[in-house]
């Protein structure tokens, strides 16, 4: 069965959902822009994740990008359009809402990281409880090199990884290739580039096939035991945004 998020103004869904064997496969769908992020897409993503989270037939969520790449980050061309897009003033709220939806998802989240996940796109890859990546894929959180903060990346990193790992990633702004991602514990598995989607789906279906509720209970218990302050709640993402200094506008596209 295939369902889609609300249709975009252009007539194509910016986020697609396909259900298979207890897995909701949620796909970022702007392949012509390497799935670069714009607030209308993020609104659809939040809606799709919320719907999958409350669907009794869904046990695992899989997040991926169309066209062989996960996500190239914010769409700077759209953010800097003249005249300004109507969503510009509410864009930060759309970003946060999408992360809140993922943070509240009770199901395990498997991410298929193909090619790259950059800056804002990296934050959505980090939402994965299990990340499957290709041998030549990479992730980069380079906001430090642009003089910007990275609140949503920090929200996920601090909630999930040791502080030494967090600081290595955010203070250098370097590309983390698949061996680095695996070494640091960000990637669950590295496979051939052309096998990422299939392997991520196989993993998701395997977990979905476990006794009903088992994976959800273990995920919930692990998060509650590890972090009593309840990161990944809506307050956690709001706090991360508050800690960022007055946001500089997104850099101009070349």
Image: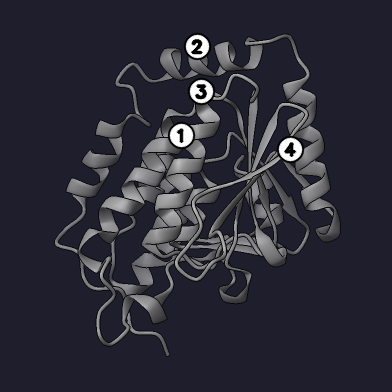
As drawn, the label of residue 5 is none
Of residue 103 and residue 191, the one placed in the foreground of this image is 103
Q: Mark 3 and mark 2: span between their CA atoms?
A: 11 Å
Determine whether the residue tagged by mark 2 lies in a helix, strand or loop. helix
Left or right of 230, for residue 208: right
**Image quadrant of residue 138?**
bottom right
Residue 5 percent coordinates (x, y): 53, 48
Q: Name the residue under label 4.
A: 1
For the point 48% across and 62% down, the residue is 8
Residue 42 percent coordinates (x, y): 42, 54
Left or right of 199, for residue 51: left
Q: Mark 4 and mark 1: span between their CA atoms?
A: 18 Å
Of label 4 and label 1, which has the lower sequence position?
4
In the rendered structure, are the residues bearing label 3 and label 1 in contact, judged by CB atoms less than 8 Å apart? no
Q: Mark 3 and mark 4: span between their CA atoms?
A: 22 Å
As drawn, the label of residue 50 is 1
Of tags 3 and 4, which is closer to the observer?
4
Of label 3 and label 4, which has the lower sequence position?
4
In the rendered structure, are the residues bearing label 3 and label 2 in contact, judged by CB atoms less than 8 Å apart? no
Of label 3 and label 2, which has the lower sequence position?
3
Determine whether the residue tagged by mark 1 lies in a helix, strand or loop. helix
Of label 2 and label 4, which has the lower sequence position?
4
In the rendered structure, are the residues bearing label 3 and label 4 in contact, judged by CB atoms less than 8 Å apart? no
Q: Mark 2 and mark 1: span between their CA atoms?
A: 20 Å
Number of callouts: 4
For the point 34% across and 74% down, the residue is 146
Is 49 located above or below residue 106 in the figure?
below
Q: Mark 3 and mark 1: span between their CA atoms?
A: 10 Å
Of residue 1 and residue 229, the one placed in the foreground of this image is 1
Q: Name the residue under label 3.
A: 106
Determine whether the residue tagged by mark 4 lies in a helix, strand or loop. loop
């Amino acid at each position: 069965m295939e369902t889609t998020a609300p249709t975009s103004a252009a007539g194509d869904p910016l986020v697609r959902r396909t259900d298979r064997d207890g897995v909701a496969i949620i796909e970022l769908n702007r392949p012509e822009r390497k799935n670069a992020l714009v607030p209308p897409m993020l609104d659809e993503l939040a809606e799709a994740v919320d719907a999958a989270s409350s669907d009794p037939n869904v046990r695992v969520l899989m997040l991926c990008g169309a066209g062989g790449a996960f996500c190239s980050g914010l769409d700077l061309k759209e953010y800097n359009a003249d005249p300004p897009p109507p969503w510009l003033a509410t864009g930060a709220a759309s970003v946060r809402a999408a992360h809140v939806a993922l943070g509240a998802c009770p199901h395990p989240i498997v991410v298929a990281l193909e090619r790259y996940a950059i800056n804002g796109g990296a934050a959505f890859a980090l939402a994965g409880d299990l990340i499957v990546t290709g041998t030549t894929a990479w992730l980069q959180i380079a906001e430090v090199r642009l003089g910007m903060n990275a609140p949503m990346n920090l929200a996920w990193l601090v909630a999930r990884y040791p502080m030494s790992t967090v600081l290595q990633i955010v203070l250098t702004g370097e590309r983390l290739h698949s061996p680095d991602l695996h070494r640091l514990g960000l990637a669950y598995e590295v496979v051939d580039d052309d096998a990422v989607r299939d392997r991520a789906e196989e993993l998701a279906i395997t977990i979905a096939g476990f006794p009903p509720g088992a994976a959800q209970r273990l995920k919930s218990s692990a998060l509650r035991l590890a972090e009593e302050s309840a990161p990944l709640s809506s307050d956690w993402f709001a706090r991360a945004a508050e800690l960022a200094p007055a946001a500089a506008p997104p850099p101009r596209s070349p």
